[in-house]
């Protein structure tokens, strides 16, 4: 089973990815973690990524896909994966589809986490001190949410057309959202 979790910053994707992965024995793939681990481990791909990160440039998709491909080839991915917040664009989605097809697999479910903007702002402002983000403001949060919505709108349409998109109400408690995820994934 291969599941993609989509949603704006602060919607709870990472928490729910961990819960779902644990519950059904899937590997969680979060690109931020992949990059951090590769850089920390000083792997070839990590050194390459670090160069972009040090220059404050976006790490190219090609490099991210090489990291994802490594994960897909790992024994932990044998039962499938939960992609946490990736892909974010149609070209990325098409590459993920091709990567899975090469393994004779496909995306089984895409869960779009629906949270009102006011709740997203509240959550991110509340978590900012713990995450040492002293520059976090309502405006920066709203900007990130707007950027997310603009970049992923076509992606949402893509998965809706494939018939694998489900919307999960994600404004409730962690447990309530986990139950919504469970219902949509059909476990």
Image (cartoon, helix red, strand yellow):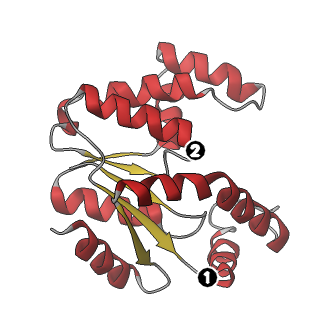
According to the picture, the residue beneath numbered tag 2 turns out to be 89
Q: Mark 2, residues whose alpha carbon is within 10 Å: few (<14), some, or many (≥20)?
A: some
The quarter of the picture where residue 69 lies is top left
Name the foreground residue: 66 vs 87. 87
Residue 59 shown left or right of residue 184 in the figure:
right
Total numbered labels: 2
Secondary structure state at the residue bearing disc 1: loop
Q: Quadrant of residue 52?
A: top right
Residue at image coords 47%, 70% = 113
Question: Residue 157 or 7: which is nearer the viewer?
Answer: 157
Answer with left or right where residue 93 lies relative to residue 128.
Answer: left
Q: Position of residue 150 (x, y in %)?
A: 70, 57
* Residue that label 1 marks: 116
Q: Is residue 160 visible?
A: yes
Instruction: Say which of marks 1 and 2 sits in front.
Output: 2
Residue located farthest toward the front when viewing the structure as drawn = 161
Q: Position of residue 116 (x, y in %)?
A: 61, 82
Q: Nearer the viewer, residue 10 or 183?
A: 183
First of labels 1, 2 by sequence position: 2
User: Residue at left 62%, top 26%?
Assistant: 60
Disc 1 versus disc 2: distance between alpha carbons? 22 Å
**Residue 87, placed above or below residue 54:** below
Front-most of 19 and 133?
19
- Look at 34% across and 29% down and name the residue there: 99
Residue 73 showing in the rendered view: no
Q: Which residue ends up furthest to the top in the rendered image?
A: 44
- Residue 3, relative to residue 181: is it above or below? above
Position above or below: 5 against 67: below
Residue 169, position as x, y percentages in the image: 44, 81
Give the SS element for disc 2.
loop
Q: Look at 44% across and 22% down and name the residue there.
A: 66
The C terminus lies in quadrant? bottom left
């Amino acid at each position: 089973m291969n599941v993609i979790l989509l949603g704006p910053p602060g919607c709870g994707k990472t928490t729910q990815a961990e819960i779902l992965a644990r519950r059904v024995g899937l590997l969680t793939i979060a690109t931020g973690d992949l990059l951090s681990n590769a850089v920390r481990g000083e792997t070839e791909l990590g050194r390459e990524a670090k160069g972009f990160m040090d220059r404050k440039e976006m790490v190219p998709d090609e490099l991210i896909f090489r990291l994802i491909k490594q994960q897909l080839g790992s024994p932990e991915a044998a039962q499938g994966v939960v992609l946490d917040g990736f892909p974010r664009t149609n070209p990325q989605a098409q590459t993920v589809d091709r990567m899975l097809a090469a393994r004779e697999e496909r995306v089984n479910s895409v869960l779009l986490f629906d949270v009102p903007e006011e709740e997203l702002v509240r959550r991110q402002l509340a978590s900012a001190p713990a995450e040492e983000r002293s520059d976090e403001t309502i405006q920066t949060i709203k900007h990130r949410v707007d950027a997310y919505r603009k970049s992923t709108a076509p992606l949402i349409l893509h998965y809706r057309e494939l018939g694998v998109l489900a919307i999960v109400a994600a404004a409730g408690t962690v447990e309530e959202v986990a139950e919504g995820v469970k219902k949509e994934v059909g476990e």
